[in-house]
Amino acid sequence: MSTDNRIVPGIVKNGVVVPQSGIELPDGAHVNIVLQPATIPQDLKEELEAWQRAGGSAWQMIDKWESEDQ
């Protein structure tokens, strides 16, 4: 196996990373695992961005409303 850095895509199955490219990695190979960002639907992404713009005061307001309901 080459000593060059390579990207080998994989998927986690039962807590173990399984390479998907057909490359067999030798036992004891040192690897770095980089998690890819999750795909978020555009409408949810926009909603999350709106909450970030609202900031902490919006969360304080929600906490206040929830405490008043109890």
Image (spheres, helix red, strand yellow):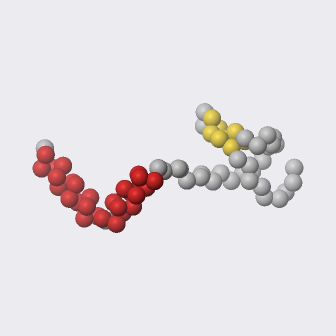
Q: Position of residue 22 (x, y in %)?
A: 79, 40
Question: Would you say 41 lies left or right of 10 here?
Answer: left
Q: Position of residue 37 (x, y in %)?
A: 55, 53
Q: Give the total number of marks visible in the rendering.
A: 0
Residue sitting at 21 percent across and 54 percent down?
63
Residue at the outermost front position: 43
Question: Would you say 15 lies left or right of 32 here?
Answer: left
Residue sitting at 62 percent across and 39 percent down?
12
- Location of residue 4 (image quadrant): bottom right
- The vertical placement of 11 against 54, above or below, is above
Residue at the outermost right position: 1
Residue sitting at 13 percent across and 46 percent down?
69
* Most foreground residue, 2 or 30: 2
Quarter that holds the C terminus: top left
Q: Position of residue 21 (x, y in %)?
A: 76, 43
* Most foreground residue, 69 or 47: 47
